[in-house]
């Protein structure tokens, strides 16, 4: 297969972990006889410094012409003023919207080797294997924002069509798993959540009668993720709720450094990134965990390139590296010698089998 991939290293540890992801991608290409061409561009703080904008037009145009986008992380103290008119996070929101990416998939699974890295008791983590599907382009993050002398407001808006398409995406994933879908909202308080619940029930009844649907309030879901996380299969929720819940769920796996994500639209083109931030405090030290980025490469292979065997090979290689105790600092046992970023990447690359 031939494919062209836009690479956006971004800020902080972004370039370091993306470098390891590209090493793994090259190993997959060699093992599978594929030709993957990569084209690098700017986003986030690096783009602000170079062009004055968090998402230069050239970056978006490049992304629109390639098969997939691999992104590192954006942000850092240099650009951290919340009152600034141009901020790194704007680049991330803009590229998602510009590419029509409305569904953010965040798989959460717990490697038995990393049970002690989680703050939860090991017995609570047995069997945890879920996917959170977060709506990406609507809700309070994109609603009208107003600021007056003594008040401020952020509008939360959803349409039937926005809810329908994200629920369909989540239901299709659930249909291929254990056929259980949890829809998370705040329908006891919010009108948008009441709309969300009504549309979800209609879509599931008419199009996915074989998938079991359960509703859960977001505060109850936050509690349940800690109390009985193995109960969940697929969760679908709106933008802000999903943002918060997936960060909470990352602690089940021991660290944000272990969790990948895929942002998808109607077509095959997607954007793939680790869920962690730019971690400027460790940037340049060679200690960042690259596994979330490498697992994001696996999602890229699966969803944008349709290479399921290759995706599984990457996931198996990460699991094998962890089993061999190649553990970066964020998941390494206290008192042990953690694996540097490059060593972790090499450990996966050396274990690619197709």
Image (cartoon, grey):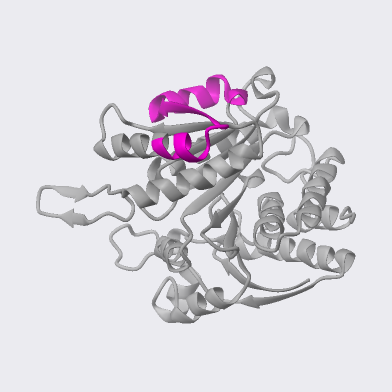
Does the magenta segment cover residue 149? no
Q: Residue furthest front?
A: 206
Please state the horizontal and vertical placement of residue 343, each as a whole percent of the image: 81, 55
Residue 300 in the figure: left or right of residue 234? right
Please state the horizontal and vertical placement of residue 140, each as a whole percent of the image: 31, 49
Judge whether residue 280 can be spotted in this image.
no
Does the magenta segment cover residue 225? yes
- Which of the 4 quarters of the picture holds residue 108? top right
Judge whether residue 21 can be spotted in this image.
yes
**Which quadrant does the C terminus fall into?**
bottom right
Rendered view: 134 above or below 349: above
Give the camera-side residue of 223 and 347: 223
Please state the horizontal and vertical placement of residue 292, each as a whole percent of the image: 66, 50
- Which of the 4 quarters of the picture holds residue 199? top left
Give the camera-side residue of 153 and 132: 132
Give the camera-side residue of 112 and 308: 308
Residue 206 in the figure: left or right of residue 344? left
**Which quadrant does the N terminus fall into?**
bottom right
Majority SS type along the magenta span: helix
Look at 10% across and 48% down and name the residue there.
150
- Which of the 4 quarters of the picture holds residue 94? bottom left
Rendered view: 155 above or below 284: above
Number of numbered callouts drawn: 0
Give the camera-side residue of 208 and 165: 208
Residue 285 in the figure: left or right of residue 228? right
Please state the horizontal and vertical placement of residue 349, each as a whole percent of the image: 84, 58
Look at 19% across and 49% down and name the residue there.
153
Look at 70% across and 55% down and name the residue there.
302
Residue 238 in the figure: left or right of residue 276? left
**Region rendered in magenta:** 202-231
């Amino acid at each position: 297969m031939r494919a062209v991939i836009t690479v956006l290293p971004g800020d902080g540890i972004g370039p370091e972990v993306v470098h390891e992801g590209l090493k793994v991608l090259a190993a997959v290409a060699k093992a599978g006889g594929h030709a993957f061409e990569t084209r690098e561009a700017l986003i986030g703080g690096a783009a602000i410094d170079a062009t004055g904008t968090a998402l230069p037009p050239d970056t978006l145009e490049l992304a629109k012409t390639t098969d997939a986008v691999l992104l590192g992380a954006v942000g850092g103290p240099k650009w951290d003023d919340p009152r600034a008119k141009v901020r790194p996070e704007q680049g991330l929101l803009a590229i998602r919207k510009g590419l029509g990416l409305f569904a953010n998939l965040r798989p959460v699974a717990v490697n038995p080797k990393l049970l002690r890295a989680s703050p939860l008791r090991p017995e609570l983590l047995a069997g945890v294997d879920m996917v959170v599907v977060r709506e990406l382009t609507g809700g309070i993050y994109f609603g009208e924002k107003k600021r007056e002398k003594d008040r401020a407001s952020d509008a939360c808006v959803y349409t039937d069509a926005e809810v329908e398409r994200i629920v369909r995406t989540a239901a299709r994933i659930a249909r291929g798993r254990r056929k259980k879908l949890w829809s998370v909202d705040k329908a006891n308080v919010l009108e948008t959540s009441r709309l969300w619940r009504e549309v979800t029930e209609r879509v599931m009844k008419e199009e996915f009668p074989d998938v079991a649907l359960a509703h859960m309030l977001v505060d109850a879901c936050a509690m349940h993720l800690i109390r009985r996380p193995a109960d969940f299969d697929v969760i679908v929720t709106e933008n802000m709720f999903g943002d918060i819940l997936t960060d909470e769920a990352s602690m089940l796996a021991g660290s944000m450094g272990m969790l990948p994500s895929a942002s998808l639209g109607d077509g095959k083109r997607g954007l793939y990134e680790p869920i962690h931030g730019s971690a400027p405090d460790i940037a340049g030290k060679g200690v960042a965990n690259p596994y979330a980025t490498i697992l994001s490469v696996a999602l890229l292979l699966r969803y944008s390139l349709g290479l399921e065997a290759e995706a599984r090979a990457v996931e198996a290689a990460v699991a094998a590296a962890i089993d061999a105790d190649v553990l970066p600092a964020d998941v390494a046992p206290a008192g042990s010698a953690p694996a540097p970023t490059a060593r972790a990447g090499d450990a996966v690359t050396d274990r690619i089998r197709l």
